[in-house]
Image (cartoon, helix red, strand yellow):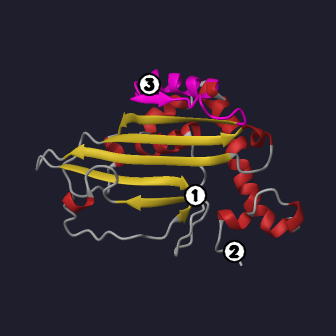
Amino acid sequence: MKKDIVDFLNILSRLSISYKSIDHKEMLPDHLWGYSIKELKFLIENSTLKHIRPKGFSNLEVLIDIDVVSQNAEWEKLNDPFDVLNFRTLLKGTNKLTGHTHYLSFHIDRHNGGSTNEIHPLYHMQYLQNGKAKPKDEFDHGESLQLDIPRMMHLPMELILGVSVIISNFAPKLYEKLLKDRQFINLTKEYQVRVWRPYFNSLESYWLTPMNNRIWDPKLNCPYLI
């Protein structure tokens, strides 16, 4: 699995997609594996900026940080393989009309199980206006309103599946090149089976499988189920 990560980063490097650093977490116990990647970066294609406000951007970039810890034994089962999964995305660019730098950020995380008043799907997306760009008290919010919005259910996204989804949305021409790479196709199919298949299976099982036969509780993924 470490080789898969290295191979995928090599595929991205052939398309001039860079990253700042990677830590393979060699000190984890033998039953776990994981990695942390900092600032995987690529440019946003201008064709995807149809609804951007304010106007005046032509140099936006995406910065992605990923933190993963996974159970080795769960990769062959229809079960949740992750202990930790944080996928943080920051969009950043300087407005050529004003000279101001603007930010947009969101994350797709695995809930850590701590107590909270809000409902947390196990894997969820949440939008954060400021992210890691500046301290909250120093950020100029303009006419925007910032508060905790509902955490929306989302597919688990690690390096291979997550970066592919982000590239397909913000750099579709680059994604077309990826789809011509057989190594990329093979890796993506494998990880869809390992990560997305059990996720969908858990939801389907709520209506099809008796409770005692379930591996992954569907109410973790969709706590709104009654």
The mark nearer the N terminus, 1 or 2, is: 1
* Residue annotated with mark 2: 225
Q: Residue at x 15, y 49 (%)?
A: 100
Residue 20 falls in which quadrant of the image? top left
The crowding category of the residue bearing disc 3, from other C-alpha atoms within 10 Å (few below 14, some 14 to 19, many at least 20), is: few
Q: Whole-percent x and y of residue 6?
A: 56, 24
Q: Is residue 196 left or right of residue 85?
A: right
Q: Which mark is residue 15?
A: 3
Q: Which residues are magenta?
A: 3-31
Return the residue nearer the eye: 111 or 61. 111
Q: Residue at x 42, y 35 (%)?
A: 38
Return the residue nearer the eye: 218 or 44. 218
Q: CA distance from mark 1 to mark 2?
A: 20 Å
The mark nearer the N terminus, 1 or 3, is: 3
Q: Is residue 189 left or right of residue 210?
A: left
**Is 20 one of the magenta-colored residues?**
yes
* Residue annotated with mark 1: 112
Q: For the C terminus, which image quadrant?
A: bottom right
Give the mark count: 3
Amino acid type, mark 1: Asn
Disc 1 versus disc 3: nearer the observer:
1
Q: Whole-percent x and y of residue 127?
A: 41, 60
Return the residue nearer the eye: 95 or 84. 84
Q: Residue furthest bottom?
A: 226
The mark nearer the N terminus, 2 or 3, is: 3
Q: Whole-percent x and y of residue 106?
A: 42, 54
Q: Residue at x 70, y 68 (%)?
A: 219
